[in-house]
Amino acid sequence: MAEEMVRFGLLGAGSIAIYRHAPEISSHPCAKIVAIYDPITSRAEWLAEQYGGEVEASEKALLARQDIDAVVVATPNAHHARLTLAALKAGKHVLCEKPMATSLADAKKMLSAAKRAGRKLMIGHNQRLMPPHIKAKQLLRDGAIGEVLSFRTSFGHGGPEMWSQDKGAHTWFFKKEEAFVGSMGDLGVHKADLIRWLLDSEVTEVGAFVETLAKCNDKGQPITVDDNAVCILRLANGSVGQLTASWTYSAAEDNVTILYGTKGQMVIGANPEFPVEVMLRNGEMAQYKVGGVSTNEAQLPSGIPDAFIDAVLDDVEPEISGREGLKALAIVLACLESAASRQIVKVAY
């Protein structure tokens, strides 16, 4: 192993840092939090009290520290690329939240910067590390439901204003200048990454409605990003299906994927007791108790910091690399283009 300990700096002390990154890093035997910066100092101070580390006065001061090996970029989306590029230039490995950037051009700059710096770049697409999804992929590789012909994958809840540190309608998630994209970037990008990973095939074309249907900001005006997205995807292997993302599922969360194959179908995440269910055309059924899918109400370990730390210590490319993050982003951008043009759009990687 190249290093015995990965020393972290956190850029951002919001909900994703509180519920995912900080506790998972601090509980890892080969990692520790050294420094934290957030524009709202009290948030950084609270996180430091809980998980250790010093509170830094600025992004620049944190990135200048020589006792930091890696940086977590856990900020509003509009700052992901800028801070990742700055961290890589400073010689740090980077774990960046999703979506990795607001344009393919910026995403490609991030990939180039990581290669130039000889540092790891990983994107926080945690869906593919959840036990039910890992089990589903194994079953698909074993041919459990045959060739997948079509699918439905959805991710919806009541909205980020109930989870974000900025509780309420003034949250940055609702502001285009900070978030760039709404439910499609918050939730849809997860499912874009998941479906291409599960089916081992790239999305080639999309058709999408990406809409603002209900959410309003603190002034009572419609938010400037989408709160619902319904997309049709075509994959290179010929599969076609639906991806749905929503911030207006007010009664219950939906984080379910259904795959329809030539032998039967697979349901992932619908049954809390058996998160993976296989139903075959001949009437046979198999249910698998393999752990849960994380929700806002039930936060489960994401596995993301662990995978990143392993990649740094073992000096290997992270499984969820910058290139993987770029492909998920490309699908989101194509859906936005389709919604704006009311045309079917080819995905550009």
Image: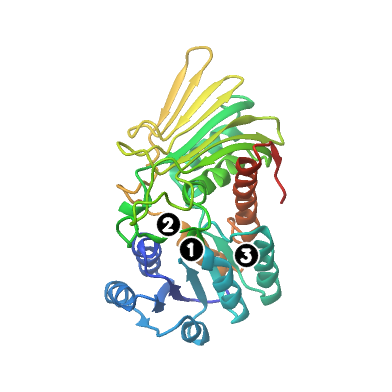
Disc marking residue 178: 1
Question: Residues at badges 2 and 1 in contact (C-beta under 8 Å)?
Answer: yes
Determine whether the residue tagged by mark 1 lies in a helix, strand or loop: helix
Image position of 344 with respect to 22: above or below: above
Q: Is residue 313 visible?
A: no
| Residue drawn at point x = 54 percent, y = 33 percent | 139
Q: Is residue 112 visible?
A: yes
Using the rendered view, name the quadrant where residue 46 is placed: bottom left
Image position of 329 with respect to 22: above or below: above
Crowding around mark 1 (Cα neighbors within 10 Å: few <14, some 14 to 19, many 20+) is: some
Determine whether the residue tagged by mark 2 lies in a helix, strand or loop: helix
Residue 40, percent from left and from top:
35, 75
Using the rendered view, name the quadrant where residue 17 is placed: bottom left
Image position of 154 with respect to 16: above or below: above
Describe residue 293's horizontal placement relative to residue 66 as left or right. left
Whichever of labels 1 and 3 marks the residue nearer the N terminus, that label is 1
Q: CA distance from mark 2 to mark 1?
A: 7 Å
Residue type at mark 1? Answer: Glu
**Closer to us: mark 1 or mark 3?**
1
Residue 9, percent from left and from top:
45, 76
Q: CA distance from mark 3 to mark 2?
A: 33 Å
| Residue drawn at point x = 62 percent, y = 54 percent | 324
Residue type at mark 3? Answer: Val
Describe residue 260's horizontal placement relative to residue 47 as left or right. right
Whichever of labels 2 and 1 marks the residue nearer the N terminus, that label is 2
Describe residue 65's horizontal placement relative to residue 118 as left or right. left
Disc marking residue 316: 3
Question: Residues at badges 3 and 2 in contact (C-beta under 8 Å)?
Answer: no
Q: CA distance from mark 1 to mark 3?
A: 32 Å
